[in-house]
Amino acid sequence: MMVRRNPFFMRFSERLGSDANFLKLFSPGVLDVFPPSTIWETTNVIRSSPGGGKTSLLRLFTPNSLLALHAHANLPPYDELYTRLRELDAIQDEGPTVLGAMISCAHDFSYLEDLPLEDVQKERLFISLLNARIVLSILRSALTMQRYKFPDDVKKIQLSCAPGIELPKGIPVQGTGSDYYAWARQLEEDICKEIDSVLPFTKAIPGHGTLFSLWLVNSESLLCDGARIAKRVAVMLDDVHELAPRQRKKLISLISATRSPTQLWIAERLEALSTEDWFSEGNKEGRERNTIYLELHWREHHSRFEKFAGNVADRRTDSASEGQITSFAGCLSDVIEPTEIERRLSGAIDKQVSRIRERAGSTRKYNEWISLKEEVKGSPYDQLVEWRSLEILIERDLQKRQKTFDFYELTEEELQANEKSNVRTGAQLFMNKELKLPYYYGFSRLCRMASSNIDQFLALSGNLFEVITSASILSLSRAVPRINAERQEKILKQAIDKKWREITQMVPNASDVRCLLEGIGNLCQVETYKPTAPYAPGVTGIAILMSDREKLKNPEILERNELYMRLANAIATCLANNLLEGRLNHKCKGREWMVLYLNRMFCVHFDLPLDYGGFREKSLDDLCEWIGKGSSESRKQETAAWF
């Protein structure tokens, strides 16, 4: 089998080559994030941690992508995506209905803050540069849609501003694309020259106070050869987190005050949000703005994420293997084969039974439960799960404050009432720890490890795909290669441990972040592996009171308490980078809590379950102690390094 370079490591949309290849690998499931009834009626703000898929979403609505999709409309694997976009009215039989113009905010804008100008002047130049690039981007997209060449054919475009909008001096209310191209190009060049210049600011460049360009490029008056180009126009700003904080704040305020005929989309990383934003009650969006948090959407619809991830994986597997492997999940064993663990199971059941009988002692209380387990059929692994589950239940009963008489035998009905699925999962986790029996394997658990982030899913899957392709190349048969459970776990643990070591290179406040995550992980380990498995299948997070959360967003409190400030910044960094997953207003024990779950990938690092639910309540002082101890240890290590 001929296999190209690993497609799971081709994560950014700009690296996926041709539009046809991009579309081939694009999974339609991600379009579920858009509410169909309002997608074209509001400003869409798309947020995620790195690798959430924001840029790919925007690229899908650009002319090149839509035209390529229209050309392949009835061919697999494009047909499903075409159908979904048709349902969203982004494309129809005649062609694309939306003219999307994509602008990256990663270039030049933030450099304006370094100019020796008053803040008001910098702000107006920022808006000027944005207006110029919106016009240039729309002209380019319009010509692409009409299959003309940019900028050679700009004269074929006609523009006219919506009535009632006042334009800055020197900008015509209506004219040809050539007129607006010359104006926008000159303005962009003048501003960029000043950014690059080492000399004092010399040229008077007009500053703008509004995004008038959104009225200038509206779909009603944007024509080519006298005909309307598209049903609607969408200006899509990518990498908004790269703007200077003051620029981003100004942009958001302009959007809030604007209801233009041109739709505006914004894509940014969660790192753009301030610490205060993370501890605020959340976005109170009006009808004018729809904010989409990609990871949050998938967490609330995990079955959809699993389906979406499977579709993404299958498309990449099929493309790389030239159709010889069509199912990525099919290459991952979801059961433990007896031959994998035969040596470790040898004598394990007998030891488990002996341990249970010894713990039960001379009492008759558990006789029926033990007899029922002795009748269980199945593989040695399944039998061991049954016995390990029973040990947990007996341990719980023995530690009850109110105990039944020893002569009372617990019944089968009582066993069934207590032996829930989470106890069995907890037993499997204990067996992973005690006997090194595989737990982290299979496609469903792989999707859990991704923590609702498609980039994280692709990174983990890529390591597995390397082994799949190697096995396929070395195989003498044409059978689809299949990785057993034990090898999957080994590969995934190695990849995740590497990610854990890279945390200090990934984020700001790295030392505090690592101390916080280690504190949470170590606490969860202790609670998860208690003999009674009280929070089966385990604990994977902590919770702070909502009232304590209020303290972490209070500037006065943070200024007085350095550790609180460091803790607030560490939590905000973890949330922005998907290292922790937050849940607000969780009711427990008559109080409301903010729950912070570990990224599921780090649950593997700490040998924890992948389920949600189990958490331990902690005070702010407890969390600050973790950070304080960590910084103290770091100082000791730095001092020791000198001797």
Image (tube, rainbow, N blue to C red):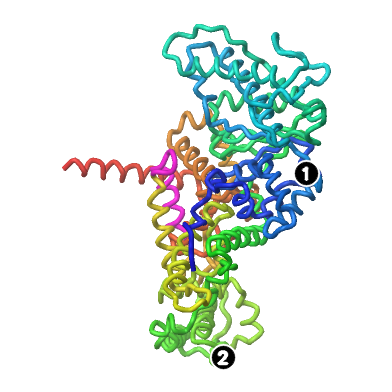
User: Which residue does the image show at 55% across and 88% down from the upper left?
Assistant: 378
Within the magenta stretch, is there residue 608?
no
> Label 2 is placed on what type of residue?
Lys
Find disc 1 in the rendering and name its residue.
95
Name the dominant secondary structure of the magenta segment. Answer: helix
Q: CA distance from mark 1 to mark 2?
A: 61 Å
Where residue 94 sits, quadrant-wise, is top right
> Label 1 is placed on what type of residue?
Gly
Residue 546 in picture, x, y percent from top left: 60, 44
Q: How many marks?
A: 2
Find disc 2 in the rendering and name its residue.
377
Whether residue 398 is visible here, answered yes or no, is no
Within the magenta stretch, is there residue 520?
yes
What is the span of residues highlighted in magenta in the rendered image?
Answer: 505-524
Q: Which is more N-terminal, label 2 or label 1? A: 1
Residue 103 in picture, x, y percent from top left: 61, 32
- Tag 2 secondary structure: loop
- Tell me the quarter of the image containing the C terminus: top left
Residue 372 vs 274, above or below: the answer is below
